[in-house]
Amino acid sequence: MDLRHRNNVSVMGNGRSTLVFSHGFGCNQAMWNYLAPQFFERFRVVMYDLVGAGLSDLSAFDKGKYSALDGYARDLNEIIDAFTVGPVVLVSHSVSAMIGTLADRHAPGRIAAHVMIGPSPRYIDADGYVGGFKLADIQDLLDTLDSNYLGWSSAMAPVIMGAPGQPALSEELTDSFCRTEPEIAKQFARVTFMSDNRQDVIGLATPVLILQSSDDLIAPVAVGEYLHSVLPNSTYCLVDNVGHCPHMSAPQACAAAMESFLAPWAVAHVG
């Protein structure tokens, strides 16, 4: 399997450590173009598309393999092994934070640190846990996706993006949603929104920076606070931002929050 073709892998930058950028549901690696270039001078940077998204190889999509987040986690570890140098810091958005957590659990020590942007281990409320949605809400969302994916995408992408005053970002996210093959998107949505990865994150010893929007429909503040409470080596940063994609709508604030956290690995390659 040609991993570069399967996941449309892009490699750039110059450093002795690697940042791997992993996008969220409905997105693709282009969503990192607002944030990633700020690190090219000090890090090797690897960006990729999850199978089924962006310019990935759609023929590589296997319904069985990708019926759970574990399949995507195994892909991520293959990409890390093939394209990174030195210590690896995973920068992940939304569901990819849990994909990265699973990848870390599969290969302890391979990922040196995580930057999780808008992460959520479970979207559905449970006893003693606030995920932001009732089970009926998620079931309604998935039913709408099944019946009218393009209509749902056009309506929901601007709500997910938020970013009042930046309409071009909503258009970009809507376009990304609408370019995703509907049947693959429907399955990935079900896998994403029905997942429960709380046991996977609890006690994860790897250093984690949690970047949380102050107003996020998908991952409310309570979720970020929960993760901070169960991740023993976590740093929590609340970014003043409306929406689920602060790496697009507030990239300077995200980069500023990442600077001190990434300092131990920010060494440019010399010679």
Image (cartoon, grey):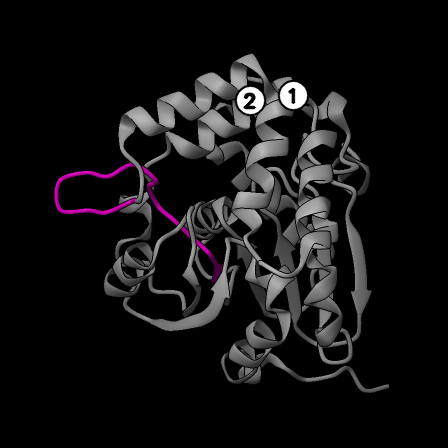
* Mark 2 secondary-structure assignment: helix
Query: Which percent across, then down, holds residue 127?
Result: 13, 40
Q: Residue furthest right?
A: 271
Pick the front one: 198 or 34: 34
Any part of residue 8 in sight: yes
Query: Which percent across, then down, holds residue 222?
Result: 27, 57
Residue 252 position (above or below residue 229): below
Q: Quadrant of residue 265?
A: bottom right
Residue type for callout 1: Pro
Q: Quadrant of the N terminus?
A: top right
Residue count near mark 2 (Cα–Cα under 10 Å), binned few <14, some 14–19, many ≥20:
some
Residue at left offset 56%, top offset 62%:
246
Residue highlighted by disc 1: 182
Residue at left offset 79%, top offset 37%:
55
Residue type for callout 2: Lys
Any part of residue 68 in sight: no
Residue 18 position (above or below residue 11): below
Residue highlighted by disc 2: 186
Q: Quadrant of residue 173?
A: top right
What residue span does the magenta drawing correspond to? 116-131
Residue at left offset 46%, top offset 71%:
239
Q: Residue furthest top?
A: 147
Query: Which percent across, then down, holds residue 130?
Result: 23, 47
Q: Quadrant of residue 176?
A: top right
Residue 249 position (above or below residue 128): below
Q: Quadrant of the C terminus?
A: bottom right
Kindly check if marks 2 and 1 are in contact, taking CB atoms under 8 A apart as contact. yes
Residue count near mark 1 (Cα–Cα under 10 Å), binned few <14, some 14–19, many ≥20:
some
